[in-house]
Amino acid sequence: MLPDESRSIVPAPIDPARLGAVLLAAGSAVRMGGPNKLLMRIDGEPLVRRMLRALQRVPIGHLVVVLGRDAQRVRVELDTFPLRAFCRVEPGCDQQVSVDAGLRALPAGLDAIVIALADQPLLETEDLRWLLARWRELPDASAAIPFHRGARGNPVVIAGAIREAVLQAGPVPGCRGWLAANPQRVHRVETPNDRFVVDLDTPDDAARLAQRGVLVEPPAST
């Protein structure tokens, strides 16, 4: 759980219509050794669906899901959600290509954009609201990157004003490269828990989640 000071945070004080998100769901998941990890069930819910639900409850007005491997099957899991759009990239492409595609699919003029990974099984809506509240405390045109005990986490929050500069730079160097080249815009945010740094990449990750009482199951059969 978040500390007491964060429990009082209500939905992030940003008009949902001015808030966008890119959910990266295009990875090849080869380290899992077979199943598409985004379709693996976390406490009974597909991982990708769980993350989209957490984002929408922030709430976020403009949400783009970037698809790659098993695009149609992943999309089926998400088609019941309102307020989302899809774009598609080639499976196995560099992550920054996915980020670029997602940013291009968002409208201009947003105040903030959340760039989120679809494979973070512990993140909750309250975590996302907490991070957005911390971003609001930063200088204008800033990016917030969560860290926990020295480990870099996700999602990243960037000011909407940064989007155009990142798109002009292109997928190489991409958003990560642009932020690295503009460190004055980047602020580390120390998080109160490790949910920002836990992802599901390998069978060992699944085993560690099970040790924490999280039920991890293979994808449902088609």
Image (spheres, helix red, strand yellow):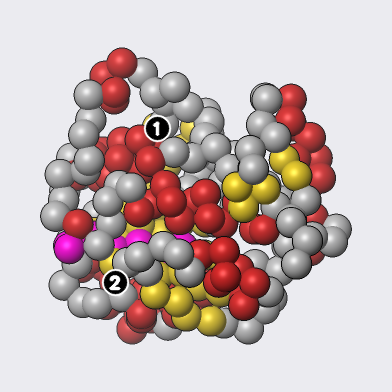
- In this rendering, position of residue 201 left or right of residue 194: right
Q: Which mark is residue 190?
A: 1
Q: CA distance from mark 1 to mark 2?
A: 24 Å
- Among the two numbered marks 1 and 2 on one chain, the one whose residue lies closer to the N terminus: 2
For image coordinates 53% across by 81% down, the residue present is: 88
Residue 174 seen anywhere in this rendered image of the structure: no
The residue that mark 2 highlights is: 163
Q: Which of the 4 quarters of the picture holds residue 10?
A: top left
In the image, is residue 25 above or below residue 156? below
Name the residue: 71% across, 69% down.
28
Could you say which quadrant of the image residue 89 lies in? bottom right
Specify whether 153 is left or right of 141.
Answer: right
Write down the region rendered in magenta. Answer: 17-23
Query: Looking at the image, which is closer to me, 78 or 160?
Result: 78
* Helix, strand or loop under label 2: helix
Q: What secondary structure predominates along the stretch shown in magenta? A: strand
Residue 105, by quadrant, is bottom left
Q: x, y (%) of residue 27?
A: 65, 67
> Where is residue 190 drawn, in percent x and y?
40, 32
Crowding near the residue tagged with mark 1, few <14, some 14–19, many ≥20 C-alpha atoms within 10 Å: some
Say whether residue 50 is visible. Answer: yes
